[in-house]
Amino acid sequence: MRPDDRQSAEVGQARSQEEFLSWMLSHSAAGICVDNDSGLAHDGANTTGAEFGNLPEVLRFMELTLEQWFAELDEHQGAIPLEILIRDLPRVRMDFEAVGKFAQFSPERYRRNRMHSGPAYDALVLCWRAGQVSPIHDHRGSACAVRVIRGMATETLYEMTEEGRVFATRTRQLTEGYMCASQDLDIHQLGNAQPSGDLITLHIYSPPLLKMGQYSLDDSQPREFEDVIYELTEGAGI
């Protein structure tokens, strides 16, 4: 039996909350991604997007609203481990009305809108018009969990040579409902590469990502990059 088949069988047998959580945590180091619409978990390192099992039956016992999830995250006073973000993000029942009021766009570049802040994290709604992309960057010192709310995101992953130059290793399309997570010095570029249509993504950063390393294909020296976070202009956040 191939390793992918073995993992698929393992997840297919997970029927209880405890079994599901144990499986998610045991595979977190591999960069597990979950497609929320299909309910399938994927290995973020697997270029074929191998299916690891059907999850909705388990998740129904574990659902949280955004408000409930933020209340749980607010209890953390220090950096929230990546494993917890991976465990909890698939549990959240996404209400677009709760997210939609934070969906503010800019014609010049993608826009980061603060939805909620806790003692150890930021929840940001990122809004992308067609053609808007982030710089090539890392998550210096932070764990990040991402969920695609509307549209299709394009992510390119990078690695670094011994001389300090970055190079692309793969590009993948993240469909609506797709979830993934990364940490610290993982290098990537995210954006809306579609010819038309908007993209909205939810990002959880712990600790809050205030500065990151920005990379260039033509320069081996990364530079420090600060990205603006916008506050909601009317009303209060969640």
Image: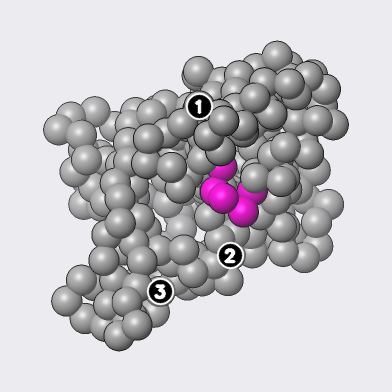
Circle 3/circle 2 CB separation < 8 Å: no
Question: Residue 55's image quarter?
Answer: top right
Which residue is tagged 2? 142
Label 2 sits on a secondary structure element that is strand
- Check disc 1 and give the amino acid type: Glu
Q: Residue at x 71, y 57 (%)?
A: 81
Which residue is tagged 1? 51
Can residue 122 be seen here? The reply is no
- Check disc 3 and give the amino acid type: Gly
> How many discs mark residues in the rendered view?
3
> Residue 132 at x, y = what percent?
23, 47
From what the image shows, is residue 79 above or below residue 203? below
| Stretch in magenta | 28-34
Judging depth in this view, the residue of 55 and 62 nearest the camera is 55
Q: Residue at x 37, y 35 (%)?
A: 48
Q: Residues within 10 Å of mark 1 (few under 14, many from 20)?
A: some
Residue 31 sits inside the magenta stretch: yes
- List the single residue furthest toward the front: 1
From what the image shows, is residue 115 above or below residue 160? above
The C terminus: image quadrant = top right
Label 3 sits on a secondary structure element that is strand
> Residue 203 at x, y = what percent?
52, 47
From what the image shows, is residue 29 above or below residue 17? below
